[in-house]
Structure formats: structure tokens, C-alpha cells
């Protein structure tokens, strides 16, 4: 059964995020959900290739999954208001897991694409709901740390289940992975039942002082620029390591994404601690962007000049750490800039920027890599991150004049026409 939710005042009086009702079940549910996703992420394309399909079809399984994910994220805030977090997350976890069993029926193209799309619907709704729910469950002064902890659970799930899916497929066949993914996702659904039955708050019908998109655009660009670069890092970094040094690269190539992911987890949580202590978001945003830029720029230099493969390890740590900080800061800035009634919209924009960036980055930078090698792809990736840095710096410069509060009294007073006193004639 779902736990009873506390009032906002009672939540703010909690002395620890761990005491917030539903916080721990949410983390466990997120771990299981991302575990189910990670089990199948590398396995479905591999199964498509082994079934005799082309590389295009294999790639399309991931592409249609992400397309369904982003499309669902657009409508999730409305569902959270109308239905509530608990039912949406239970249904989303169910949709993420049960369609995995559909892959047991057939390995034809229609089955690969249909069941991938259905899983994408579940994943899209779940990712938006869990990020927004954290802002609803924990005291505001612990939101940075809570968001960072969410990133830790996501990261650990990926580090554990990505290689586990491939290993299980090799040892016991693809069918065993499909069943395992369904079971793990159903565990997430059960844990979602322990989440308080609350709904996203209704938005005010009064006109806001500033358009929502003007407030969230820059954080969205920041996370999108790095997620596009992550598309190249996740696609090409292990292969680049092995190409640069066949001997050493064969040993560490498989661990490169884990190294990058581990750095992202650690510094995302660190970023949350800094935000909570500072009492505001954004303190580590620019340092994170600079680290991410340094990471992909170093990748380009190392590959172009044939330097030691260990420089790529450093580059992976820099990029992963920077990406982790930007992930947390972008989400916290969106929460901070928008009224509490729009936390679900903030989560939706953040997730769409992240997921769309990863998909577009894989496609665009893969196109560049095919024509300008890996060094060219990472050079373009560095330029994309630089655009994000420029946007953030410009936003900071103009930020002193931005009104972020909903129904800002000072701004409204300035809008009231004040009649001028008539001059006295002498």
C-alpha cells in the first residue's frame, strides 16, 4: 500500500531526506527501472543483428525507443496532475517491463520495433515522474543532495546491468535477458506502490511574469550540449581506446564507460551537496561545463596526436565528472526558476533535453566520425559544449535583471500607472 503523504510544512520540518515518506521506495524503484532498461539496451540491437537484420534495423530499435520516450515525456506532466504520481509510475514500470516479454514471440522487424516503442513509453513516463517526485517528497534544503542521490542510483544500475545483460545473453541466450528485464521492471512497479498517493499541483491560471521557456532554456541547452557529446563518448570511446593502443586498450576499453559513469555519479552527488550548502543552484554549473569541455577536447587531441591511451582515461574522468555536475545543476536550476506548481514541467524539459541530446548526438557525431574520424567527432563535440558554456555565461550576465518569481510583487507594482503631479503655475 502507498504511504501517507505529509503536508509541505511537515516535509520542510524533516531533519533528513531519508525520513521523507516514499523517498527510499522511489530510489529502489528507479534503480530497478533503470536496471531493466540497461539490461536490454545493448542486447536488443545485438539480437537484431544475430537474427540477420541490418545494422540500420539494429540501430532503429534504440532510435524508436528514444523517440517514444521523448514523445511520452511531453504529456507526462498532465498525467501527473490528472492521475497522480503513484498510478503513473506503476503503469510506467509495467509498460517498461512486460513488453520485454514480447520479444520472446518473434524476432521479426515489426516485433523488434513495436515492443521497443512500448518500452519507450514506459521509460519516458517514469523518468519524468521520478525526477519531479523527488522535489515533491524531500525538504527544499535537501533537494540538491536528494537529486544527486537519485543520480547515484541511476548510475549504479547502469554500471551493474549494462554488462550483466550482455553476459546473460552470452551464457543463457536472449530469452533469459527478456525475462530478467520484465521481472526487474515489475519489482520497480511493486516499489512504486509504496510511493505516497499525491498529484502534481495544478498550475495557476494567472499569467506568469516570465515565459517558462525563457527560464528553462539555458539550463536545457547546458545539459543538452553535454548529452550530445555523451552520445559520441558512449558510442566511440571504447573503440577509440582499442584503436589507439590495441594491447592496453583491449584491457581498459570495456571499462571506459564505467569509469566515465562513476565520475558522473560521484560529482553529481558532490554538486548536490554544494547546492544545498549554498542554498541555491548553479554554483558548479560553469565548472562542470568547463570540465566537460576539457574532457572531449582532450579526447580529440589524444586521438589526433596518438598520445598515450591513459590520457583518454583522464579525459573520460573529466567529461564524466563535468557531465554529472551539469546534470544536477540543470535540474536544480529549473526547479529553482519555476514555481513549485511546475516541477513536473521542469522534469519533463530536463529529461527531453537529456534524452534528445543523447540520440541526436549519437546520430550527428556518428556522421561526423564516419567522415572525419573519432578526433573530428570529439572536436565537434567540444564546440557544442562551448556553445552551452557561452549560453550560460550570457545568462549569468543578464540574470541580474531576470524576474523568476511567480506573481512577483515588485514587478507588478512597477506596472501600476502612477499619475504625475500637475505643475503649479507661478
Image (spheres, rainbow, N blue to C red):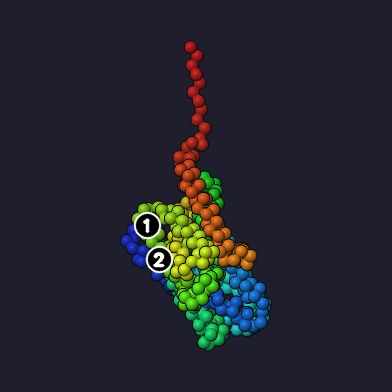
Task: Using the image, determine if residue 67 lies above or below residue 285.
Answer: below
* Location of residue 113 (image quadrant): bottom right
Q: Residue at x 58, y 73 (%)?
A: 119
Q: Residue at x 50, y 47 (%)?
A: 394
Which comes sooner in the sequence, label 1 or label 2?
2
- Residue 7: where, in percent of width, then height? 40, 59
Visible in this render: residue 393?
yes
Question: Which label number is shown at residue 266?
Answer: 2
- Residue 215: where, in percent of width, then height? 51, 50
Q: Residue furthest left?
A: 15
- Residue 126: where, in percent of width, then height? 52, 68
Tag 2's secondary structure?
helix
Q: Residues within 10 Å of mark 2 (few under 14, many from 20)?
A: some
- Residue 221: where, in percent of width, then height? 54, 55
Q: Please give the residue where the numbered disc 1 appears in the rendered image.
A: 274
- Mark 1 and mark 2: Cα distance apart in space: 13 Å
Amino acid at each position: 500500500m502507498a504511504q501517507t503523504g505529509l503536508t509541505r510544512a511537515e516535509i520542510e520540518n524533516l531533519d533528513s531526506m531519508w525520513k521523507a515518506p516514499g523517498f527510499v521506495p522511489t530510489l529502489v524503484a528507479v534503480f530497478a527501472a533503470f536496471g531493466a532498461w540497461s539490461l536490454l539496451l545493448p542486447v536488443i540491437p545485438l539480437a537484431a543483428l544475430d537474427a540477420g537484420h541490418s545494422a540500420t534495423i539494429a540501430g532503429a530499435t534504440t532510435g524508436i525507443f528514444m523517440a517514444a520516450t521523448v514523445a511520452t515525456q511531453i504529456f507526462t506532466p498532465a498525467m501527473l496532475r490528472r492521475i497522480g504520481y503513484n498510478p503513473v509510475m506503476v503503469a510506467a514500470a509495467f509498460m517498461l517491463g512486460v513488453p520485454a516479454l514480447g520479444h520472446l514471440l518473434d524476432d521479426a522487424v515489426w516485433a523488434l520495433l513495436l515492443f521497443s516503442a512500448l518500452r519507450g513509453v514506459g521509460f519516458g513516463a517514469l523518468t519524468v515522474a521520478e525526477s519531479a517526485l523527488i522535489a515533491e517528497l524531500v525538504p527544499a534544503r535537501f533537494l540538491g543532495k536528494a537529486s544527486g542521490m537519485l543520480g547515484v542510483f541511476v548510475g549504479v544500475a547502469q554500471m551493474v546491468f549494462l554488462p550483466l545483460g550482455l553476459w546473460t545473453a552470452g551464457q543463457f541466450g536472449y530469452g533469459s535477458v527478456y525475462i530478467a528485464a520484465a521481472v526487474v521492471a515489475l519489482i520497480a512497479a511493486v516499489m512504486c506502490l509504496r510511493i505516497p498517493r499525491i498529484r502534481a499541483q495544478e498550475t495557476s491560471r494567472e499569467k506568469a511574469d516570465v515565459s517558462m521557456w525563457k527560464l528553462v532554456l539555458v539550463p536545457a541547452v547546458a545539459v543538452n550540449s553535454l548529452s550530445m557529446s555523451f552520445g559520441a563518448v558512449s558510442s566511440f570511446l571504447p573503440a577509440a581506446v582499442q584503436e589507439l593502443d590495441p594491447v592496453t586498450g583491449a584491457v581498459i576499453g570495456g571499462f571506459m564507460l564505467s569509469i566515465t559513469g562513476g565520475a558522473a555519479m560521484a560529482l553529481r552527488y558532490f554538486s548536490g551537496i554544494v547546492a544545498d550548502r549554498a542554498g541555491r543552484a548553479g554554483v558548479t554549473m560553469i565548472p562542470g561545463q568547463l570540465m566537460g569541455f576539457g574532457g572531449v577536447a582532450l579526447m580529440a587531441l589524444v586521438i589526433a596526436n596518438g598520445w598515450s591511451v591513459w590520457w583518454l582515461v583522464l579525459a573520460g574522468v573529466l567529461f564524466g565528472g563535468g557531465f554529472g555536475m551539469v546534470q544536477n545543476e540543470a535540474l536544480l536550476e529549473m526547479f529553482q526558476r519555476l514555481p513549485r506548481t511546475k516541477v513536473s514541467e521542469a522534469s519533463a524539459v530536463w529529461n527531453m533535453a537529456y534524452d534528445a541530446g543523447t540520440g541526436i548526438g549519437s546520430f550527428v557525431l556518428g556522421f561526423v566520425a564516419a567522415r572525419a574520424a573519432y578526433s573530428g567527432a570529439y572536436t565537434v563535440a567540444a564546440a557544442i559544449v562551448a556553445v552551452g558554456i557561452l549560453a550560460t555565461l550570457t545568462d549569468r550576465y543578464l540574470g541580474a535583471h531576470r524576474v523568476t518569481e511567480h506573481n512577483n510583487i515588485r514587478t507588478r507594482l512597477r506596472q501600476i500607472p502612477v499619475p504625475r503631479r500637475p505643475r503649479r503655475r507661478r
